[in-house]
Amino acid sequence: MTSLTHPQLFGLGRNPAAPDDVLVRLAAHDHGRHGMHLRRGRLPDAVVEALLTHGGDSAFLLRGDRLSPDMLRRIEAHPDPAIRDAPAGFVRSMVENEVPIGIDSIEEAYGRPRTALAAAPDPKVRAAVAQTWWERPLAVQVTLLADPDPRVRAAAALHKKPGVPAHWWDRCLADPATRGNVARHIPLTWEQFAELTCAGEEGLLRAVAGNPHLTAEMAARLVDADDPVVRVAVARSRHVDAGTRDRLYALVEAEHADGSTEAYVALHWNDVTPGWLRDAPLEERLTHLDRRDPAFRTELASCRDLPRDAWRRLDGDPDLGVRRAAARRPDVPPAVLERLVRAHGDHVRPPLVEHPNFPRHRLRSFVDEVDPGVRRVALEDPGLPEPALERLAAAEESFLRRGVAQHPGVTLALLERLLCDPAPDVADEAAANPALPLDRMRRILAGAGL
């Protein structure tokens, strides 16, 4: 068996058209099983039986949501404890390694209601519940905020929802495990603000700087901060004047130009946005069309009541993120969408080509573009003609060949060629295409000795 067979088996495992007998044979190979892990929906009983027979790394496939009631009972009575515990074991391993997982899965794995799990003996279980049960009642939230383990308390205060009740604010601000999370969201008194900003903790100062409830006096106290993340957060506050905004942003840009990693993070990975701008009067919002910080222009582009001239300016904005945000509006002209995608490709989600106004009849013309990333957009046309698919399948870039292998209109001759592509991900996608004939699926299995 050649190594080329492995991606083919992986692709077959997730091929939605693969019949039960193909999946049963794939269950004997680890690459086939790994492919089945990515299948959607319930696994047929015969396939589950084959997975039980072959064992190996099958356990991660035997989760409750993938099994029929009969197979769940079959596994619960299995003589091998590793198999018996497989569905719950997968979830418990996620909890043990502190990987967030849905509350429904946690309930199923531990066999107890979420209210009981919020008081489980294991603090990792309590923390997992606090992370993922967002609709918990106030009484449960208070219990988690008072938990003896700091990890649980931190998880309980992490998100805006369900939030920290007002009568708990002082206690949470005094707790090192929760104060950073709480300082980011709640209205602060001047005394609380002063204490938090004098604590000498970088993360705490950043949390406070991003708090949308800061007063003008508080924002003024942070203007001279050295931390570029704090500077950008203050520059996005509603309480600073235009000159201060531009000065702070220019300082961070200069630090970025000098090679500062922190300045790069402040400019490009800062989750503080001028969300307050959306509620400002239109006249005030329009004064930010020339703001140096593109976050303001991006926020403007999320509005829907701007005049035509403002949209023209946003459509021609020097920042690509702003132009893409503006292109999401319901009445964007088709020519704007096409120009944007033709210049930069369509690597964002949801794709701009899915916008109702995108001129989809123009998609096949993208096959003539020079930039391979832009040329890929042609594959969004489900009716792309065979000559265009042939051209893309001959491209040097494997991501283009991979796109052809995924295409619903790929010919059987092309699919056969792509099954033998030297790039594993191309062969994998070809084997996963539901257009692959059944006899070809079985030949792949035979070639792998299955």
Image (spheres, grey):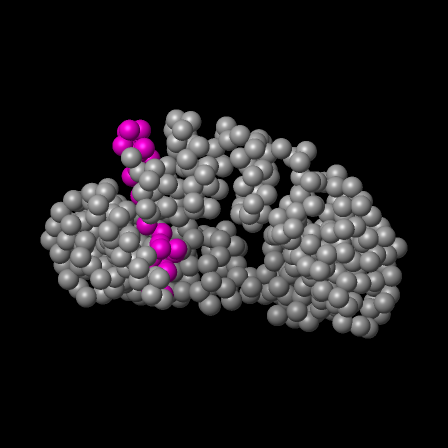
Going 44% across and 32% down the picture, which residue do you hit? 312
Q: In which quarter of the image is residue 305?
A: top left
Going 37% across and 41% down the picture, which residue do you hit? 297
Going 32% across and 33% down the picture, which residue do you hit? 286
Residue 233 vertical placement versus 7 (above, below):
above
Q: Nearer the viewer, residue 234 or 152?
A: 234
Question: In this view, which residue lies farthest toward the left?
Answer: 191
Q: Is the magenta stretch mostly helix, strand or loop?
A: helix
Q: Which of 7 and 268 is in front in this view?
A: 268
Q: Which of 346 and 311 is in front in this view?
A: 311
Q: Where is residue 292 in the image (x, y as percent from the top left)?
A: 32, 46
Decide if residue 360 is in sight here. Answer: yes
Residue 22 vertical placement versus 80 (above, below):
above
**Quadrant location, the N terminus:** bottom right
Q: Is residue 20 left or right of residue 103?
A: right
Q: Position of residue 293 (x, y in %)?
A: 33, 47
Q: Give the range drawn in magenta.
A: 261-286
Residue 162 vertical placement versus 327 (above, below):
below
Q: Quadrant of residue 222?
A: bottom left
Q: How many labels does the image show?
A: 0
**Quadrant location, the C terminus:** bottom right
Going 29% across and 35% down the picture, which residue do you hit? 287
Q: Position of residue 42 (x, y in %)?
A: 67, 50
Residue 264 inside the magenta-drawn segment: yes
Decide if residue 302 is in sight here. Answer: no
Residue 269 inside the magenta-drawn segment: yes
Q: Is residue 61 left or right of residue 391?
A: left
Q: Where is residue 127 in the image (x, y as percent from the top left)?
A: 38, 60
Question: In this view, which residue lies farthest toward the front?
Answer: 370
